[in-house]
Amino acid sequence: MKDLIDKTKAIARMAGQTEYAQARLAKRFSRLNFLIAWIIIGMTASVGISHFAPYGYTDPAIAAFVALGAAALGIILRVSGITARTTGHRVAETQYSRVRRDADMLILKMRGGDLSRAEALSTVENLNTTLCDLIARTTPVSNRMLRRAGKKFDKANPEIRHTLPEMEPSDFLRAAAPNTGAGRKQ
């Protein structure tokens, strides 16, 4: 059962760090959308206010260029699909969250002895298939973003962070220290 628990932890970690990355991307695109929208509102308001100013204080050519700039930003905002991308990342975040919750519940059931090995194996396979299908369907996330999200996820979930095999204390003391090369025969 230990090998299935380790595999389930790996699935939970992959889903969790991708969930964090998708949330981060959704937040980034939401902020960008908000910023561009407020710039458009400010430019449009300045053109609108300039119509109420005395003629000698405003130049119609400048107001026209500001209005064209606001329209261009609006078109860029619409064509780039930032709002749709934000929504897509939020939907992906909730889907990865569901996979991670399912993996966490499966770990609890396996540790509690509520599942037989055959049932646990079947459930882990289904969970792995679900995760692979979800990865294929959703927008890919850059490796840099995944590394950052992985660090944040590991800090928030230390129980899933390490999936090294558990050892008896005597075996642990005889084993080589990790990443140092100590205990190896030359």
Image: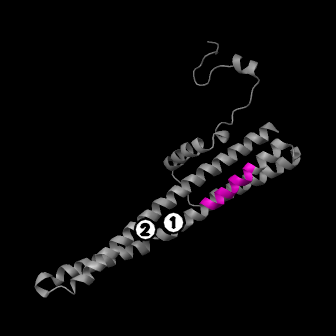
Residue at image point 55% right, 45% down: 152
Q: Position of residue 136 (x, y in %)?
A: 63, 58
Quadrant in the picture for the C terminus: top right
Element under disc 2: helix
Image quadrant where residue 179 sits? top right
Name the one closer to the observer, 99 or 118.
99
Decide: few, some or many residues near mark 2? Use Cα within 10 Å; few <14, some 14-19, many ≥20. Answer: some
Residue at image point 34% right, 76% down: 41
Quadrant in the picture for the N terminus: top right
Please report the bounds of the magenta region as a residue range.
Answer: 93-104
Residue at image point 73% right, 40% down: 6
On screen, 64 above or below 155? Answer: below
Q: Earlier in the sequence, mark 1 or mark 2?
A: 2
Q: Which mark is residue 33?
A: 2
Per the model, the C-alpha gap separating discs 1 and 2 is 9 Å
Is residue 171 on the magenta stretch? no
Q: Position of residue 88 (x, y in %)?
A: 56, 66
The answer to whether mark 1 and mark 2 are in CB contact below 8 A is: yes
Element under disc 1: helix
Question: Which amino acid type corresponds to the residue marked 2 in the rendered image?
Answer: Asn
Question: Which amino acid type corresponds to the residue marked 1 in the rendered image?
Answer: Thr
On screen, 57 above or below 90? Answer: below
The furthest residue to the top: 186
Residue identified by numbered label 1:
86
